[in-house]
């Protein structure tokens, strides 16, 4: 469990006795809530056979704890092991992963950084190699941390998902080179596993190297092991820590896994109690609200059913598709995890677990027509959305540091800004929960860098204008009246 902290100073700004809590997901071993999804996706890949079993210290020092000629199947040398046309930076990242794996297993992911760090941390403990493709608009600390964890890192220009150069598409292509086209089987065998040669394969003519590499594309945006991890862990923890008294859950979305998974659990428990005629602490179901940064299309998807933002016009784009200083949140498309939050759910027992199972077994699950007449309790998981500006996030981050002693990153600042806005509109005595995703330590080159914030993004740095009496009035900065 990660701690759930009450924010006394932020809550005291309100006059409706509403309490704001933050789930400290930055307390996970990898320093981020992405640890949960990463663990779930790795375990799922191991169970499905996409990755080998984890390495253990009792294993032989040879790869995967066996002699390298065990269980080798040789075939005619018709596979393509040519990697000469693969870009140098990608080749170097692949080589790093192949040299570091103890299981023959390679994790591959396209990520803005935080999920990659969680995957890399867990890959170390399980003996797998890892390759991460990430956009060039993320903090240097993330890339450096990934490299220190033994990760092969590929940095690409940020662009639309429709572009083959998008970091997710690059990650998928690396997976195809390793797992489908088998371009590195010969390199891995002759350079890493068996560099001395003289084995049984050298005595067989026209044989290809063994297919030892087992690579798995984590695909966090579409992988429902992501949302499942929060439905089965984060949601129940929050519910238990507040004895079921959760009136609203507010946060931003990268993949949508946390928002949807937690929201589904909280609503499911509320509706189950109603159906069982238990006394409820709240007379209405918990509100699940998306916080969205500038340029993301998710706000309009929730508000108007259309996934589009005016910032996505090519002539208006600054550096990337989401046009925000915040890292790791906001999207220009609807992912499988987020899409579940936009569906109308009939709240019967374990309704969301059943829905995940349906979706996992049908690639066209969004088109499924369901008979929901069996339940009188129906709703979408995500109820509403609000947009937070980069400037508001900067003001909130500095306010939190001064008054709550919390040093948070950009997405966490947006989450708490959104929570404060929602809290000001909630009934007397409500309990509001949001998430501190990671600490500010990973954001010192961008979000916590005055020159970058002021000169690159044209924003105000809190404390610069000492003559403005409203500069430190966070309610004013958020456009709220107490």
Image (spheres, rainbow, N blue to C red):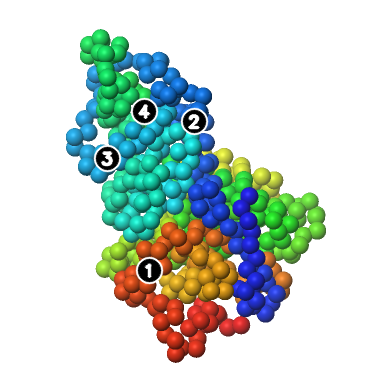
Q: Is residue 295 visible?
A: no
Q: Position of residue 461 (x, y in %)?
A: 41, 77
Q: Which residue is mark 1?
A: 449
Q: Which residue was labeled with disc 4? A: 213
In the rendered image, which residue does mark 2 sit on? 54
Asked if 450 appears above or below 297 in the picture, the reply is below
Q: Specify few, some or many for label 3: CA neighbours under 10 Å numbering under 14, 14-19, or 20 or more.
A: some
Quarter the C terminus occupies: bottom right
Q: Residues within 10 Å of mark 1 (few under 14, many from 20)?
A: few
Spatial separation of the CA atoms under disc 4 and disc 3? 17 Å
Q: Position of residue 385 (x, y in %)?
A: 52, 66
At 21% from the left edge and 30% from the top edge, which residue is drawn?
82
Within 10 Å of disc 2 (Cα), the crowding (few <14, some 14-19, many 20+) is some
Q: Position of residue 274 (x, y in %)?
A: 75, 55
Q: Which of the two labelled residues, at mark 1 and mark 3, occupies the earlier sequence position?
A: 3
Kindly indicate the quadrant of the structure image that contains residue 123.
top left
Judged from this view, the residue extending furthest toward the top is 203
Q: Are circles 1 and 2 on residues that touch, CB within 8 Å? A: no
Labels 4 and 3 touching (C-beta < 8 A): no
Which residue has dot 3 on it?
92
Q: Secondary structure at mark 1?
A: loop
């Amino acid at each position: 469990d990660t701690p759930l902290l009450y924010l006394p100073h932020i809550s005291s700004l309100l006059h409706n006795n509403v309490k704001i809590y933050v789930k400290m997901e930055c307390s996970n071993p990898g320093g981020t809530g992405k640890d949960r999804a990463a663990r779930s996706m790795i375990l799922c890949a191991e169970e499905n056979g996409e990755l080998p079993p984890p390495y253990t210290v009792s294993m032989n020092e040879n790869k995967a704890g066996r002699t390298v000629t065990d269980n080798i199947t040789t075939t005619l040398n018709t596979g393509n092991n040519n990697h000469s046309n693969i870009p140098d930076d990608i080749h170097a990242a692949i080589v790093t992963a192949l040299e570091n794996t103890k299981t023959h297993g390679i994790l591959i992911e396209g990520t803005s950084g935080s999920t990659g760090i969680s995957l890399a941390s867990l890959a170390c403990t399980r003996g797998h190699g890892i390759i991460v493709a990430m956009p060039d608009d993320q903090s240097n600390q993330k890339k450096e941390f990934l490299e220190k964890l033994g990760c092969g890192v590929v940095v690409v220009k940020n662009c639309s998902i429709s572009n083959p150069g998008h970091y997710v598409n690059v990650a998928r292509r690396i997976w195809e080179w390793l797992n489908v086209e088998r371009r590195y089987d010969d390199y891995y065998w002759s350079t890493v596993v068996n560099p001395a040669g003289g084995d049984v394969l050298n005595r067989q003519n026209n044989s290809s190297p063994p297919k030892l590499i087992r690579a798995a594309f984590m695909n966090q945006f579409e992988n429902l092991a992501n949302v499942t991890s929060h439905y089965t862990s984060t949601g129940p923890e929050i519910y238990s820590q507040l004895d079921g008294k959760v009136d609203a859950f507010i946060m931003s979305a990268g993949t949508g896994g946390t928002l949807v998974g937690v929201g589904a659990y909280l609503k499911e428990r509320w509706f189950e109690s109603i159906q069982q005629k238990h006394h409820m602490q709240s007379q209405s179901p918990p509100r699940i609200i998306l916080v969205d940064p500038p340029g993301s299309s998710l706000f309009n998807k929730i508000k108007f059913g259309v996934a589009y933002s005016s910032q996505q016009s090519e002539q208006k784009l600054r550096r990337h598709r989401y046009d925000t200083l915040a890292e790791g949140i906001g999207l220009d498309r609807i992912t499988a995890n987020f899409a579940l939050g936009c569906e109308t759910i009939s709240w019967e027992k374990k309704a969301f677990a059943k829905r995940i199972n349906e979706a996992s077994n049908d690639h066209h699950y969004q088109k499924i027509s369901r008979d929901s007449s069996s339940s009188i309790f129906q709703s979408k998981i995500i109820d509403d959305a609000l947009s937070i500006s980069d400037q508001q996030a900067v003001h909130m981050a500095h306010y939190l540091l001064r008054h709550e002693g919390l040093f948070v990153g950009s997405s966490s600042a947006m989450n708490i800004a959104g929570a404060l806005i929602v809290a000001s509109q909630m009934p007397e005595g409500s309990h509001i929960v949001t998430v501190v995703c990671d600490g500010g330590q990973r954001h010192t080159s961008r979000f916590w860098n005055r020159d970058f914030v002021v000169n690159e993004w044209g924003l105000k740095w809190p404390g610069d204008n000492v003559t403005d009496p409203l500069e430190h009035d966070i309610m004013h900065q958020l456009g709220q009246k107490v």
